[in-house]
Amino acid sequence: MLLSVPNVIDLAELTATAQEALLLSIAVSLPVVGVAALAGLLVAIFQAATQVQDFTLAHLPRLLVVAVVLALAGPWMGAQIASFAARVFAGG
């Protein structure tokens, strides 16, 4: 007599879920990384134009911009991750 396991995931579904997880991780991190890169570029242009080479000036604006973006986009990021997790754990 064969026993059937009701919640076994096949390889194609596992691959699709892993691909969706990787794309979701890129999608939720892209706003923060993009804004940090843009802030770094603007600070670098400012430093090159004014020849001010200060460590604090190089990192503080990027830190503040990333904190603001995380505060604004955090609820959306959390909702996307929670939705994905609920869908995966529900088996759909």
Image (cartoon, helix red, strand yellow):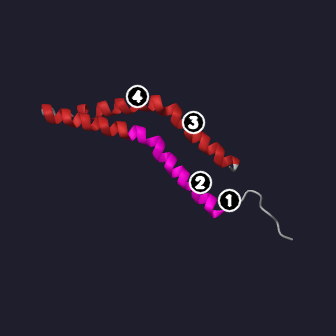
The residue lying at 15 percent from left, 36 percent from top is 48
| Residue at which label 1 appears | 9
Q: Is residue 20 above or below residue 43?
A: below
Using the rendered view, name the quadrant where residue 5 is placed: bottom right
Q: Secondary structure at mark 4?
A: helix
First reached walking from the N terminus: tag 3 or tag 2: 2
Residue count near mark 1 (Cα–Cα under 10 Å), binned few <14, some 14–19, many ≥20: few
| Residue at which label 2 appears | 17
First reached walking from the N terminus: tag 2 or tag 1: 1
Q: Amino acid under label 4?
A: Val
Distance from the alpha carbon under mark 4 to that under mark 2:
31 Å
Distance from the alpha carbon under mark 4 to that under mark 1:
40 Å
Q: Nearer the viewer, mark 4 or mark 2?
A: 2
Residue count near mark 4 (Cα–Cα under 10 Å), binned few <14, some 14–19, many ≥20: few
Magenta span: 10-33
Q: Amino acid under label 2?
A: Thr
The answer to the question of whether label 4 and label 3 lie on touching residues, with beta carbons closer than 8 A, is no
Q: Secondary structure at mark 2?
A: helix
Q: Amino acid under label 3?
A: Ala
| Residue at which label 4 appears | 68
The residue lying at 57 percent from left, 36 percent from top is 79
The residue lying at 69 percent from left, 50 percent from top is 91
Number of the label disc, if any, that sits on residue 79: 3
First reached walking from the N terminus: tag 4 or tag 2: 2
Magenta includes 1?
no
Distance from the alpha carbon under mark 3 to that under mark 1:
25 Å
